[in-house]
């Protein structure tokens, strides 16, 4: 697989996976279900880890796509910038999840930390959704935004 294929194969996990895990996490927080909390925190760590190859395959994927298609560099740059921020926030969320797991193992996971992780997860999801939207605009003109530079003046 080339980097573009890796990027495309994995890029939905940080969005769709995070959405699903946040539903479970919210259930665990509000129902005070320790098992659901633990599984959700482990899944957040997993998603943070899977985001690493997604992020690092982005730059090589950009080089491939720029060589093979006539895609707007502006759209690619916006996607890249949004991806950098979302990646950092996602990795921060993964660290928060590890802290949560540590605290949970000591029976000291406070409701405040649970709400912090849930809130950080929601913010991360919004950032990731923006990255996905911008990424979709690179190769999906049906989203309604003109992508190709030759048409940028119309």
Image (spheres, rainbow, N blue to C red):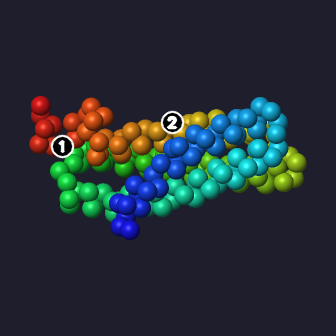
Residue at the bottom extreme, as displayed:
1
Task: Using residue 56 as the reference point, say whether residue 102 is left or right of it.
Answer: right
Of 144 and 123, which appears nearest the observer?
144
The spot of residue 67 in percent (x, y) is 20, 60
Label 1 vs label 2: CA separation?
26 Å
Seen at 87% across and 52% down, the residue is 106
Q: Which quadrant of the view contains residue 114?
A: top right
Seen at 34% across and 63% down, the residue is 60
Check disc 2 and report the residue beneath it.
126
Numbered mark located on residue 41 in the image: none
Numbered mark located on residue 148 in the image: 1
Seen at 51% across and 36% down, the residue is 126
Q: What SS does tag 1 mark? A: loop
Seen at 15% across and 37% down, the residue is 152
Instruction: State whether residue 19 is above or below residue 4.
Output: above
Dot 1 or dot 2: first in sequence order is: 2
Task: Using residue 48 as the reference point, say whether residue 98 is left or right of it.
Answer: right
Q: Which quadrant of the view contains residue 46?
A: bottom right
């Amino acid at each position: 697989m080339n980097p573009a294929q890796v990027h495309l194969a994995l890029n939905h996990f940080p969005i769709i996976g995070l959405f699903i895990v946040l539903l479970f996490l919210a259930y665990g927080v509000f129902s005070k279900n320790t098992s659901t909390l633990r599984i959700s925190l482990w899944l957040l760590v997993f998603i943070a880890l899977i985001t690493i190859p997604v992020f690092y395959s982005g730059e090589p994927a950009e080089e491939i796509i720029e060589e093979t298609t006539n895609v707007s560099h502006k759209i690619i740059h916006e996607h890249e910038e949004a991806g950098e921020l979302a990646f950092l926030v996602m990795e921060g969320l993964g660290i928060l999840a590890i802290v949560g797991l540590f605290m949970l193992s000591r029976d000291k996971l406070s409701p405040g930390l649970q709400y912090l992780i849930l809130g950080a997860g929601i913010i991360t999801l919004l950032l990731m959704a923006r990255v996905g939207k911008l990424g979709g605009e690179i190769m999906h003109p049906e989203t309604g935004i003109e992508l190709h530079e030759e048409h940028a003046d119309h």
